[in-house]
Amino acid sequence: MPLTYASMRRAGTPLRLSAGAAAMLMFGVAGIHGNTATASDGAAERSVDRSAFGQLPDGRQVDVYRLANANGIEMRVIDYGGIILSLKTPDVRGEFDDIVLGFDSLDAYLSDAYRQANPYFGALIGRYGNRIAGGRFSLDGESHSLATNDGDNHLHGGQQGFDRVLWQVEPFESEAGTGLVLRYTSEDGEEGYPGTLETQVTYTLTDADELIVDYRATTDKATPVNLTQHSYFNLEGEGSGSILDHHLMIDADAFTPVDEGLIPTGEIRSVEGTPFDFTQPTPIGERIERDDQQLTFGKGYDHNFVLANGGASVDDPVLAARVWEPDSGRLLEIATTEPGIQFYSGNFLAGDLTGKRGEAYEHRSGFALETQHFPDSPNRADFPSTILEPGDTYRSRTIYRFSAQETPGS
Ligand code: GLA
């Protein structure tokens, strides 16, 4: 009997990442209108400040926001693409390092080389994370044509996705930590999508060493929505080589196999006995070179995993993945309300982009774990729906938790 999406979700109590996290995020928390605000509840100073980062070709200014929590974790974000530029977290010895791939200048994000490689470092992705086959879908009997930017397919929102637009940003401080509310209105017809989409994403850096990403959207016409965040991590520090020794656990018993164009075939396939079984922590590189058609199509891992406990609630994120790096001991845990996660092992990185510490980003020197609905869902009635209707609110939450420990744990 073929597997179905419903049959691959486990029954039982979801694994919660953080009991407090669900209650913490409130919209409309007091905004910070000056350039800097600090509070000193913990050992380090909590802060959020803003400065100029650069200028877009049309003259609009791009700002960079620096957030810090009470334990010294620091994150920098720009309003262009909502891009997370840097994220410094401690290793097991307490040494801080920047664990996300990115650049220190706006020009690097705007360069032809970057456009060509299209890695989406640290960016917000919308309206639709991952691919829509042929850039086409039908909705309520009407067919829609989207901008194509990945051969014949539509990828990550098209030519001018949410990764390339300027967001309105409002910093805030709340009980949980410091953060940013980012807003963007996507006009009716943008990149071919129906409806005006009012989008709001909140980044909160908490004193529990979590980055909480909250997504909301409303529309005036039915339209697909699948927002995500495209940070690439290297837990040893950006620019410090391959991620193949990182131990990865994904709480998924199944994945969605793809064709050569990385479009899901519609099958929900068990991971058992395949290189896609990450139910137990396994080094990313252990099976990546195996002779396996799916690894060949993906040029490594570039697949959507069906989360065992995913998609159950829009309020309660459940643990989806854990990644541990042996030299630094850094541990990243990801919890989400989404039904899927795209594990991408940085297969298209080719050493032609140079990062913040002056090192080229070589093949597989960063990985992304993109929480999401499944690719091509608008063309797959049996996948969880991505259609947002007028009057409804799209909601999604993902939590990244940073810590460090000597052993991989389980
Ligand atoms: C996603 C896609 C990949 C690739 C990267 C960005 O993970 O699935 O195929 O496009 O984004 O390079």
Image: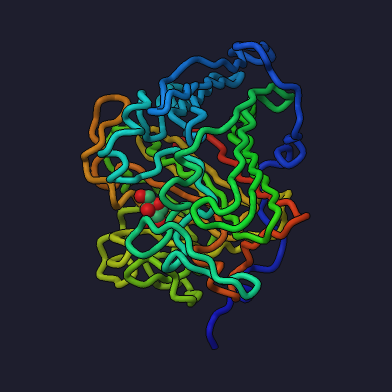
Q: In the figure, 143 relative to 226: above or below?
A: below
When asked about the image quadrant of residue 99, the answer is top left
Q: Residue at x 30, y 54 (%)?
A: 285
Q: Residue at x 61, y 18 (%)?
A: 70
Render colour scheme: rainbow
Q: In the figure, 270 relative to 100: above or below?
A: below
When asked about the image quadrant of residue 19, the answer is top right
Give whichever of 191, 174 is nearer the camera.
191
Q: Residue at x 55, y 80 (%)?
A: 3
Q: In the figure, 37 relative to 382: above or below?
A: above
Please state the horizontal and vertical placement of residue 309, each as a whole percent of the image: 63, 61
- Left or right? Give the position of 350 relative to 164: left
Please state the horizontal and vertical placement of residue 26, each as a whole percent of the image: 76, 34
- Left or right? Give the position of 339 relative to 133: right
Q: Residue at x 41, y 34 (%)?
A: 100
Give whichever of 251, 293 is nearer the camera.
293
**Quarter that holds the N terminus:** bottom right
Please state the horizontal and vertical placement of residue 27, each as a whole percent of the image: 75, 34
- Left or right? Give the position of 106 relative to 318: left
Please state the horizontal and vertical placement of residue 194, each as a whole percent of the image: 60, 58
Would residue 73 be seen by someone viewing this image from the given angle? yes
Would residue 344 be seen by someone viewing this image from the given angle? no
